[in-house]
Image (tube, helix red, strand yellow):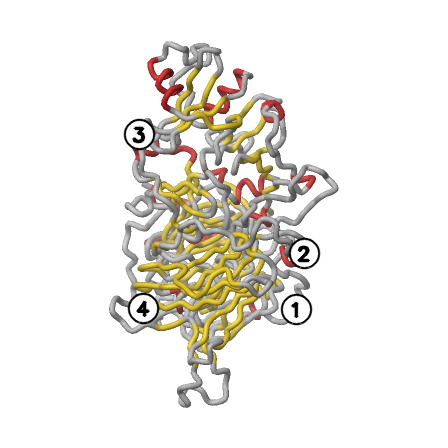
Amino acid sequence: MESVMKRSVGAFAPILLAVTACPEDAMVPPAQFQKTEEGPPIPLGNAGGGDIRVHLPFAYRNLRMCTQGAHGIFSHRGRTTEFGVDWDTDNYSKESVYAPVSGIAYVLFDGMEVGFGLHINIDLGNGVYIVIAHLSETTIRSGQWVEAGQFMGFEGNTGYSAGDHVHLGKMNGDASVSALRGMSVPFSITVMDSSGSEQQIPVESLQCGLPGGATYRSANRETQCHPDGTLVKMPGTNLEQAKVYRLNNGTRQWIASEQVFRTSGYDFDKVVVLSPDELLSYELGNRISEEGLTDMAVDAQGKLWLVVGASGSREKYRVRLPDREDLAWSIADSWGAAHRYSQSECPCADYPDNQRYLHDYGERGGMATYRDGTILKERNGPRIYVVSGGRFLHIRDMETYRILNYNEIGLDAQDGLPPKAVMEILDGFISAMGNVMVGDCDRGYLCLDRDIVTKPCGSELGTGGQSADPGTIVDPYGDSEEEQDGGIADAGAQEAQEVQGAQGDGGMDTGETADAGTAGADGGERDAGVASTGTNDAGAAQTGPHDAGTATNNGQTGTLSVTWIAPLNRTQASLLLSGEYVLSDGSWALTWQDLASATNAAQVSYTVPGAASGDILRFSVEFRFAAGASPSWSCIDRRTDPQLHQGENPLMPQGTVLAFWNGAPATVEYVFDPTGNPGCGVRVVVP
């Protein structure tokens, strides 16, 4: 039962008690709840932790209100909480929590109404750790290594708490036991200022309170992109959470049933758990609902074939496997096609289905390769690759490997490599395949690293160039190094706090009731990084506006993506994004029309493949909070209402716009209707 409680307390409804905060140490439970069998407090080690930066445990660019800081009068006066900080979260939805530092994580549970509740201690070494407390559910194992920015679970209201929030603190003590046994020590938090630069602020300098707390922007870069072919799901077991998807070209394709999953040759042991934020950032693609089939066949000449697709499928095909037999079997195994045979018993010509395969399945040109989503390494080689679009993307290091959550598809205690996830192949197999694109991070070519996977997927994930020439290293996003780092520069820049007049839900370590209403009323920016729980209907493939020969931005085109997020990230009954697209030479690619829609969602997205520098997308979003309700718009022209417009900017943005070209931010402007009629919209210019 203990392990179940550590993993998730989502099945238990939080109970809010009006109790008096202890003036000495409000987080210490009453005597009847103390675990006396654990003995006296652990002797304290030195400060340790080095110069490790402690981030906010929230997604990149999220704004969070500090409701109680160091020495807070409600409950931050005791040994375990003195320098802790409480961060506001929503009382009405589960919000994702990400590791604020890298280290060995321990999942611990004090009780539903006692102490830190469900919490994670991340060991920094030398008797120092970071505590993230009052969670509702965790998605990691106790004792595993986590990377800063790795998805760990959901915020909540467990322990001695009176409203959903996250407690963040630095402690001296033993990370493997409850944080109630540690001692709170001073530390600094890394946040992002208004210029996009990182800044470290001592916790005693934070402006916290309810009301009156400032909001601070997270500089914690979480995982936002996985390669094509990856099998993914959200954490949890209800019908929606249990859905398994295949990532394909920036979309998530729902595999409609277990029968479809298994007959397609997939393996549940290789499904990666993603944060809802990342999973729902992929547009919903075509459903995979046909039963599948993966098999092998041999022709009269003894040539082996890979057979894909059930007999009734319109997309069934066969493709030649390499002549080298052991390589052919290895490739077929990645497709789940070799499981019914042993290599010594090949699918001989008298196998009943062979003749049907050879006659009924159309031949696909080229040679079969490892299935997209396969993670592999040569037996004695140091490099790990993941196949995406038939290319072998080189995973730069274990940091990247872990932040992609690949280490959670099973674990080998010796070297940290999960045997169920990594397919080991014989040395020389990759070069024996001939004309395949193989990544090399040392050359900046087809490389996956932290910088790439913590940005939205670009049109060429991991591509550092179109050849393996070490002298031709091309930035995969077309940006300068500074822009790739999100403008992170001098940490001594302007102070990173944005004081808002709104009050949050007041989650803090206190027994007093502190729910001050709906959290995060900060112009809709607070949850800008959180994907909606609705279904985006605009998942159809789109044609790029430029011909392949158009010479723009040094001959490069890329993917322009825009996402509009409703105010306060509230789910809307319907959203409709309409717009027009003008090419850099002034010609029209699209006149004004409906481009994307979503229902029961908080956001709507639109993607333009083949966008080039100087192109302009102008759009507006109509959104309705309830069916039949009056619509509102993503931009309101207030010139027609003198009571609303009294000298200030007459254009009033509604919601939040996120715009990227090849993963780099694109310029977002608010403009009047060019026809002269009342109204306004959003204009995005490709950089």
Mark 4, other Cα within 10 Å: few <14 / some 14–19 / many ≥20: some
Query: Could you tell me if the residues under marks 4 and 3 are in contact, i.e. CB atoms within 8 Å?
Result: no
Residue shown at the point (50%, 48%) measured from the top left: 225
Q: From the viewer's perspective, is residue 83 above or below residue 42?
A: below
Query: Could you tell me if the residues under marks 1 and 4 are in contact, i.e. CB atoms within 8 Å?
Result: no
First of labels 2, 4 by sequence position: 2
First of labels 2, 1 by sequence position: 2
Q: Amino acid at mark 2?
A: Ser
Q: Position of residue 678 (x, y in %)?
A: 42, 80
Q: Quadrant of residue 233?
A: top left
First of labels 4, 3 by sequence position: 3
Q: Amino acid at mark 4?
A: Arg
Q: Residue furthest front?
A: 587
Instruction: Name the quarter where the C terminus is drawn.
Output: bottom right
First of labels 3, 2 by sequence position: 3
Nearer the observer, disc 3 or disc 1?
Answer: 3
Nearer the observer, disc 4 or disc 3?
Answer: 3
Nearer the observer, disc 2 or disc 1?
Answer: 2
Lateral position of residue 224 relative to residue 642, left or right: right
What residue is shown with label 2?
480
Q: From the viewer's perspective, is residue 29 above or below residue 108?
A: below
What residue is shown with label 1?
493
Q: Secondary structure at mark 3?
A: loop
State the CA–CA distance, disc 4 to disc 3: 42 Å
Q: Secondary structure at mark 4?
A: strand
What residue is shown with label 3?
312
Instruction: Name the quarter where the N terminus is drawn.
Output: top left
Q: From the viewer's perspective, is residue 517 above or below residue 62?
A: below
Q: Quadrant of residue 186?
A: bottom right
State the CA–CA distance, disc 1 to disc 4: 41 Å
State the CA–CA distance, disc 2 to disc 4: 40 Å
Q: Position of residue 101 (x, y in %)?
A: 55, 52
